[in-house]
Image (tube, rainbow, N blue to C red):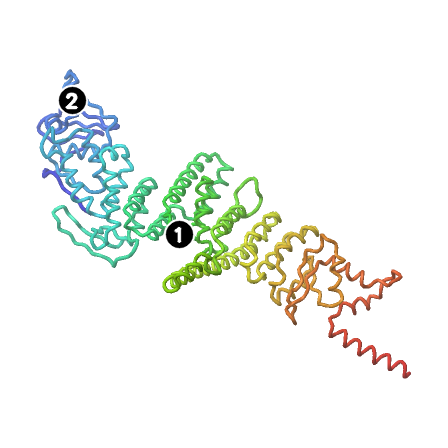
Amino acid sequence: MKFMKLGSRPDTFYTIEAVRSVSSDVSSDLIIQVKGSKYMLHKFPLLSKCLRLQRICSESPETLQRQIIQLSDFPGGIEAFELCGKFCYGITITLSAYNIVEVRCAAEYLQMTEDVEKGNLVYKVEVFFNSCILHGWKDTIVTLQSTKAFPLWSEDLGITSRCIESIASKVSTHPSKVSLSHSHSRRVRDDISCNGAEIQQHRPTIKGWWAEDIAELSIDLYWRTMIAIKSSGKVPSNLIGEALQVYASRWLPNISVKVKAKKDAAASSSDSDSASEVTSKHRLLLESIVSLLPSEKGAASCSFLLKLLKAANILNASSSSKMELARRIALQLEEARVSDLLIPCLSHSSDTLYDVDMVQTILEQFMSQGQSPPTSPPRSKLEIQRRRRSRSAEIVNIEFQEARRSSSASHSSRLKVARIVDGYLQEIAKDRNLPLSKFIAIAETIPNFSRPDHDDLYQAIDIYLKAHPDLNKSERKKLCRILDCKKLSVEACMHAAQNEKLPLRVVPPGPLSTTTSNIPADDQWSMSGIKSPKSRISTLKPKAARDDDLDENNMNPDGMGRPSKLKTFCALPTRPKRMFNKLLSINRSGSEMN
């Protein structure tokens, strides 16, 4: 840390019965009261350097032996006043980043300027601030933090703005050229005095070395500092995103647990006002972080953005902040994890565990971004190709290859998102309060061509049916319509064939499969061509339609039903039927011989 010493006399201030005074052969003739503290001092050393005290004394009649002055609005308190008083007496004082702001404000209040005396306190503090404080990394940050106690004075004197500009310039400079008196890991220290002597150690250069240090700033100062850093245009957007993540980790750790505990406590006690105040501070902090996010895609990780969205839901942040986060998440949704999408639902109007509507919004944003890539060059380009075959052919080919690469990337993203959504459906399907319409809406957001197989979707449907046993027949049919049975694997088909909760049965090809025309219109929602264990293609039909078909095929012309054994025989696959025919013929021949 840098420091500066002023004055040469030893400290002679002392306290008697809560009154501060200074040792002198001359009796005191001035009493100054500063925020409840009383000082018995002398006019000559103080009035010779403080223009404000001169004017106050000249306006007050000297009716008493000691003149009394009250400084009720003095900035900085008794510590700053005592430093100014000692400077007037020539007593040694030490200035550093920890007290320079309050001393500067106090000196300005007392008007200790060059108009009163050359080399006065305001001038010396300014020299130290500009030549030493602003040149050091830690000194600048500590000084900027100190301005929080005197916001108006610091703004008027330009202390805050100069500190912010200094930090922004250092961030955009190579660390080897910065006086790093405070490193990213808090391990580098240096002793620096104003005479230029310094002992400094430089740690290896790290990208984003500054993020953890400025994370100590309050949100208003941090916001202004980050705006200045972004405005310089010299810091990559990904480093800005990493810095914001460091700051959020510093000030929003486990926000969901803490806020919920505070809400529970507020509901059962009289501390609701304090809990609301804490929530408001966190909400302001989060919305400020969202406003600082770089516009470039990938500047902040998808996981970090989703954590911010969870916190926004918990803190009841503004809808604009939520929508901005949703838009940014949609840009890189393929990077998300299922656990990140499980956003708690705290709405009083919904009993669901997770905020499905927000995820629906994110998915819609994601799907609206993709456009169908061209599968062949545009017609106009083909015409140009015929006219200028030499050069234009190369241009068309390059553009087409770029379009194909973009197409491949977009399709790859959709495939990844489809996997994520199916995993998400499996998680939310366990929620007994999740309406069927919302489950279907999430599933249908992903187009069919983005799901190469429907095994994960089938598993989600199976979980939903188990968690919602009260669904009626029509609701189960509606749920299963989102399933493309042609995309089920052998294992999934076998499971579906034995799944009593599904309104489906896997029926082998044969006479029974030809009766689908007799199925009522509202039951013809099934799709044929399911993969069977042998041929990977079977027919998936409603259980009700299957029963109807069996009934129709098992009726005699006279209306009498066939024996149950014959029903079973009709339901057998082709090969087993042939075996049974052989057995029957052997039995018949044997009976005739007998």
Seen from the viewer's position, the closer of residues 479 and 26 is 479
Quarter of the picture holding the C terminus: bottom right
The kind of residue on which mark 2 rests is Arg
**Residue 507 placement (x, y as % from top left):** 71, 65
Circle 1 sits on which residue? 297
Residue 62 appears in which quarter of the rendering? Answer: top left
- Along the horizontal axis of the image, is 121 left or right of 551? left
Question: Within 10 angstroms of label 2, few (less than 14), some, or many (20 or more) residues?
Answer: few
User: Marks 2/1: CA distance?
Assistant: 61 Å
Seen from the viewer's position, the closer of residues 197 and 347 is 347
Seen from the viewer's position, the closer of residues 192 and 408 is 408
- Along the horizontal axis of the image, is 36 left or right of 428? left
Rendered residue at 90%/84% (across/down): 593
Rendered residue at 14%/40% (across/down): 127
**Residue 131 placement (x, y as % from top left):** 16, 43
Question: Within 10 angstroms of label 1, few (less than 14), some, or many (20 or more) residues?
Answer: some
Rendered residue at 31%/50% (across/down): 211
Marker count (numbered): 2
The kind of residue on which mark 1 rests is Lys
Seen from the viewer's position, the closer of residues 451 and 133 is 451
- Along the horizontal axis of the image, is 578 left or right of 227? right
Mark nearer the viewer, 2 or 1: 1
Residue lying at the far front of the rendered structure: 387
Q: Which mark is residue 55?
A: 2
Residue 487 appears in which quarter of the rendering? Answer: bottom right
From the viewer's perspective, is residue 61 above or below residue 22?
above
Secondary structure of the residue carrying numbered label 2: helix
Q: Earlier in the sequence, mark 2 or mark 1?
A: 2
**Residue 301 placement (x, y as % from top left):** 40, 53
Secondary structure of the residue carrying numbered label 1: loop
